[in-house]
Amino acid sequence: MENNKLVIGRVNGVYGIKGWVKVYSHTDPVGNILNYRPWWVNRQGVWTAMEVVDSHAPQGGKAIVAHLKGINSREQARELMGCDIAVDRDQFPEDADGFYWTDLIGCEVKNQQGELLGKVTELVETGAHDVLRVIGDKRYLIPFVYDVFVFDVDTDQRIITVDWDASEDEL
């Protein structure tokens, strides 16, 4: 993904017959996704700016529904299913750590002994703390806790250094 975009949601369904889509929001609270314009929708590897013309956030859950300009049928809406939704990075303040979670996806993870554990495929919210899902020769779930398990995050070199034993059982 282009470095100037942050993924904030994904189209995960259709709603009705007039082209509305269901959107899973990564924002907190869920409805904050509606505060950002335009939405950049990744259609077959191409980011396209799309205008939200109407929307609402149902009570509970992580989904909202939106009507995007030019999408006027259930069939057109279905073509957007699975597409990521991003916004321009400059719409957000700089994070205190200098990165957002999305910046960590794809980073190599090495332990303090220099052994490559794999690459970050996602971050998982557990309630207590977030967890790096790392896949290489083995699979690891590494708690994202600074100075305990995570010692350095270099987004320029795309390397995260952790205190983790490479011989740990696969998760």
Image: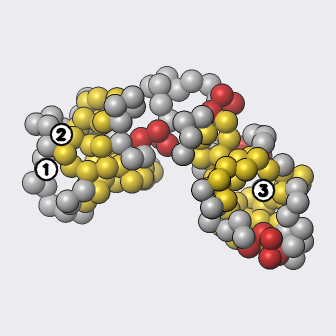
Mark 2 = which residue? 111
Q: Secondary structure at mark 3?
A: loop
Circle 3 packing at 10 Å, graded few (<14), some (14-19), many (20+), is some
Chain-order first, disc 3 or disc 1: 3
Q: Please tell me the numbered disc located at residue 166.
A: 1
Kindly report the distance in space between the C-alpha atoms of the residues bearing marks 3 and 2.
42 Å
Image label count: 3
Kindly report the distance in space between the C-alpha atoms of the residues bearing marks 2 and 1.
7 Å
Tell me whether the residue at label 3 lies in contact with that at label 1, contact meaning CB atoms closer than 8 angstroms: no
Q: Please tell me the numbered disc located at residue 106.
A: none
Chain-order first, disc 3 or disc 2: 3
Residue shown at 45% from the left, 25% from the top: 97
Q: What's under tag 3, amino acid-wise? A: Ala
Q: Secondary structure at mark 2?
A: strand
Residue 7 screen position, x and y as percent: 60, 46
Tell me whether the residue at label 2 lies in contact with that at label 1, contact meaning CB atoms closer than 8 angstroms: yes
Mark 3 = which residue? 57
Q: Which image quarter holds the C terminus?
A: bottom left
Residue shown at 62% from the left, 25% from the top: 93
